[in-house]
Each structure stands twice: as structure tokens, then as C-alpha cells.
Amino acid sequence: MEIDAAALAAAFGGGLFGAAVGTLPAFIFTGLLVLAGVAAAASGGGTDILTHAAFGPVFGPHISFGGGAAATAYAYKRGLLETGRDISIPLMGLNRTDVLLVGGAFGLIGYLLNALWQAVGLGPKTDTIALTVVVSAMIARLAFGNSTLIGKSFTPNEAFHWVRHQERPAQAAAIGLGVGLLSAYMAGVLGVERGGGVLGFGIAAATLVFAQFGLKAPVTHHIALPAATAAIASGNLYVGALFGIVGAFAAEAFSRIVHMHGDTHVDPPAAGIAAATLLARLIWPL
């Protein structure tokens, strides 16, 4: 397993900064960088922004989002926050260096976990960044939470919903279909080399700025990315849309089994991406 020392150092910084600005705001920046990276790739500028910034040790979700989520759980453990589940809070305002350092440490953990998955050959089988986000959050829950990984009941606790306005099956299917079609279409038009595979993901992540401000916006990056992946692999727009629905329901299932019953954030969209991508790559191996 090759470790890039400079990238490892950057991952510490990325995790720390993710904690400072807040978990969800950091992910919104990921979306903005994806959009910038796609624009560069589509205009012939290459994929360096996508590889090294949006999905690398700067704002890769396994770095900045993972660091922010873990630091939020730690702050909750220390009694600095009322919940470890609210990922919208910038933690710089707590004025606690230890909280920021935990974010940096989990940035390192995210980098190393993703490198490990790649080294053992999981790269062609699933989305290792999404897998890392889930595993990192599980580590944080075990370290800092007061709940187990899986709650005592599969009935959603009324106090703990993930995205209440899209959890009904009809809502999940509808948004899965709509966003799946959009993302699959863009993937087919642009192709991989011009960033089509992640354009829908970038749009979905960037639109979470509305959720950050308390609006009931949809959460859809777990729909957009599997849809694009399946559309490119199969060459079929409607298969891509189907995988958008798969991603929607996979995230909802994970939310009900793991996320809803805990006191820290274990990301349902990342689980949905990992599961739906695994299914797509079982059908169409790389």
C-alpha cells in the first residue's frame, strides 16, 4: 500500500478544515469543486481538480466530511454539543483545539482506509470513498457515541429522522427516478473523460446549501452517482435511472437500520452509494 506523505499531510489539513467549517458545509464545497473539475475536464483541462481536490485529500468526502462528522461526535462526547447528529454546525465556534485535531486525525484515518481498500482490490468493486465515509463514521460512533452501531428496534424513532420529507417510499422512488434520469443523461452525453460520471453528484452535493439553511431540499447525491455509474456501464439511460432508485432505497434502508437509532451521524447516502455501486459493478465488472 503506497502512502503519499504530502497527500497524507494534506488529509490532516482537510479533515481539520472540514471540522472547522462544519461537516455539511465541507461537503457542499466538495460539490462546488466537482462542478469546477467537470468544467475543466469538459473544456480539455484534464481531471486534476477532480482527482486531487474534489475527491482527494483536500475535500474528498472521506477526508473533510469524515473528519467533520467524527469531530462533531467527539464534541458531543465532551458535552460541547447537544447531539452528535447535527452535521450543519461549524465547529470552529466551539473554540476547542482538541475538536479540530480530532477532525484532522479522522482525515488521516479516511485517507488510510481508502488507500487500504484500493490496496486489497476493492476499487473495481465498489466506491471506496463512500465505503470509507461509512466505516469512518462507525469508528467515530464506537469511540464517541453512547449508542451501538445498530439500534434495538427497526422502527424509526420519531425523534431521529434522516430526511423526513423524502423517506416515504413514493417520495424516495419519485426523487430517485427524476434525479436518476438527469444524472444518467448527463453521464451519457459527457462521458467519463469529460466528467459526466460525477456531474450529477456535484450538482446534488452543491444543492445541499439549501438544506444547510434549513430548507426542505432533497438529498440526492446517493441517487445521482449510482445512476451515472450504471448508465455509463450499461450504455442505457433507463438502467441508470433504475440505479438511481436503487441508491435512494439503499440509503433509506441504511438510515432505518443504523443511522436513525444512534446519537452520531453515520451517513446513509454514502452507504447507498457503496451498495448501489457494488451491485452495478457485479453486473458490469470493470
Image: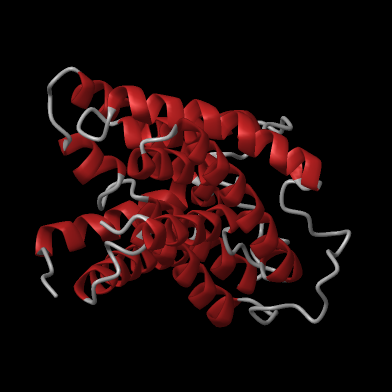
In the image: residue 39, left or right of residue 73: left
Between 4 and 173, the residue placed more toward the observer is: 173
Residue 84 seen from this side: no
Between 20 and 18, the residue placed more toward the observer is: 18
In the image: residue 259, left or right of residue 26: right
Between 172 and 26, the residue placed more toward the observer is: 172
Q: Residue at x 71, y 43 (%)?
A: 172
In the rendering, at what x and y percent does residue 153 appear?
83, 77
In the rendering, at what x and y percent does residue 88 appear?
60, 45
Q: How many marks?
A: 0
Q: Could you tell me which quadrant the N terminus lies in? A: bottom left
Height in image: 98 above or below 17? below
Residue 244 quadrant:
top right
Height in image: 147 above or below 189? below
Q: Residue at x 86, y 68 (%)?
A: 155
In the image: residue 152, left or right of residue 231: right
Q: Residue at x 70, y 79 (%)?
A: 147
Residue lying furthest top in this view? 43
